[in-house]
Amino acid sequence: MNNDVPTRAPFTGTAEVQTRPYDAVQMKNRIQVGPIIGGIVLAITVMLVLTVLGLAVGASALDPKDMGKSVGVGATVWGVVSAIIALFIGGWLAAKSSAVAGAPSGVVNGFSSARASSCC
């Protein structure tokens, strides 16, 4: 055994704690790329699922005699509603999964995800 190693006595005093007006870890970047990519993937997936659901419902309700305006209007309305739902869900995921403090940072991630998803 090597007994040359000095040992320290346990700390028995008091230490001064400095209080700071800010967090111990300061934020450097409010936009996180990972949650934005996750939101984009989820938004595209939800859009695909809702599109297939709309296609199935539309095909089952299709009247072969009425191939006019009503089919186009219904498809347009369903496309807009499903896009809004998909972008909301993708933005919500990006906002909630961003690991930054404060609601404004989550909103920035959510809007970034929804904006990027709408471009695809």
Image: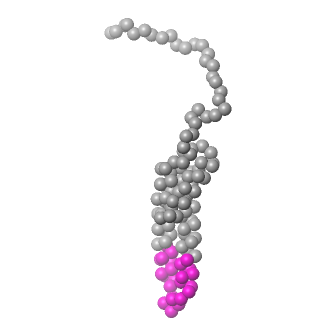
Q: Residue at x 53, y 83 (%)?
A: 71
Q: Note whether 73 is above or below 14 in the view shown.
A: below
Rendered location of residue 15, percent (x, y): 61, 18
Rendered location of residue 118, percent (x, y): 52, 64
Judge left or right: residue 120 versus residue 95: left
- The answer to which image quadrant residue 92 occupies is bottom right
Q: Note whether 42 is above or below 78 in the view shown.
A: above
Depth order, front residue of 87/10: 87
Tell me if residue 90 can be seen: no
Q: Residue at x 54, y 73 (%)?
A: 79
Q: From the image, which quarter does the N terminus lie in? A: top left
Residue that lies at the very extreme toward the left in this rendered image: 1
Q: Note whether 22 is above or below 80 in the view shown.
A: above
- The answer to which image quadrant residue 14 occupies is top right
Rendered location of residue 56, percent (x, y): 47, 77
Depth order, front residue of 112/78: 112
- The answer to which image quadrant residue 20 occupies is top right
| Magenta stretch, residue numbers | 53-76
Q: Residue at x 58, y 36 (%)?
A: 26
Q: How many marks?
A: 0
Q: Main secondary structure of the magenta part?
A: helix
* Residue 108 among magenta residues: no
Tell me if residue 55 can be seen: yes
